[in-house]
Amino acid sequence: MKVSDILRVKGNTLYTITPEELLTKALDVMSEKDIGSLVVMDRGDLVGMLTFREVIQQVVKNKGSVGTASVRASMDSAPLTCTMETEIDEVRRMMLERHARYMPVMDGKILMGVISFYDVAKAVVDAQNFENKMLKAYIRDWPEEDVPDSKF
C-alpha cells in the first residue's frame, strides 16, 4: 500500500499558513478547522510544519502564553516528507523514528496533501480487516473433499 492510497480515500483538503503570520492566527485556524497541523508555505514552497507540539513548546518558552511569536519562530523548519509512491511501511517507520504525527506529501515541490499517523494506522487496520474477511470467506468456501468411508 502506498501514500497515494491513503490520500485517495482521505481526500486532498489542505490547510496552509505563511511563516510571517502570528502564531495566534495559526491557532485560530487549527481550532476553527479542528486540525492538528498546518503546512507552512512561503511563495509556493514548503518551508515548515506547525503542529500542536510546536505550539506547546512555544507556550512553555513564553511561560504560559503564545505571546507575539510568529509561525516561523515556532514551526519545524525541517519536517519529514514523503511522496505519493512511498510505501506505508516506510512512512510508519519514518514517523515512529521522528515521533512525527503529520507528514506532508510532496510531488517534487508540489504539496499533494498531508497524512497523519492516524491516517496511516487506519489504512493498516482497514487493510488487515479486508484481508481477514477474504481469508475467512476463502476458508468458509473451502471445497469438501471426498472422504472415504471408514471401515470401523
Image: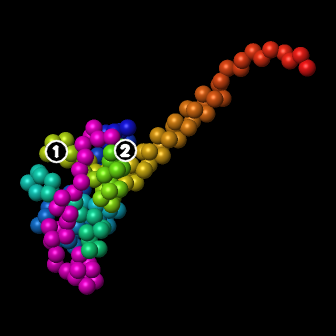
Going 22% across and 73% down the picture, which residue do you hit?
24
Depth check, mark 2 against mark 1: the one in front is: 2
Point out which mark residue 48 bears: none
Q: Vertical placement of 40 versus 110: above or below?
A: below
Going 44% across and 45% down the picture, which residue do you hit?
124
Q: Earlier in the sequence, mark 2 or mark 1?
A: 2
Quadrant of the image for the N terminus?
top left
Element type at marker 2?
helix
**Residue 142 among those drawn in magenta:** no
Residue 39 position, x and y percent, is 22, 57
What is the quadrant of residue 60 in the picture? Answer: bottom left
Relative to 35, 81 lies left or right? left
What is the quadrant of residue 18 in the picture? Answer: bottom left
Residue 38 position, x and y percent, is 24, 60
Relative to 73, 129 lies left or right? right
Name the dominant secondary structure of the magenta segment: loop
Question: What residue is pinned by disc 1?
Answer: 110
- Name the one closer to the observer, 8 or 60: 60
- The residue at the far bottom in this view is 63
**Magenta residues?**
58-87
Residue 93 position, x and y percent, is 34, 50
Q: Amino acid at mark 1?
A: Ile
Residue 87 position, x and y percent, is 33, 40
- Name the one closer to the observer, 123 or 68: 123
* Residue 35 in sight here: no
What is the quadrant of residue 116 in the picture? Answer: bottom left
What is the CA distance from the residue labelled 2 to the residue labelled 1?
23 Å
**What crowding class fits label 1: few (fewer than 14 Cα within 10 Å), some (14-19), or many (20 or more)?**
few
Question: What residue is pinned by disc 2?
Answer: 89
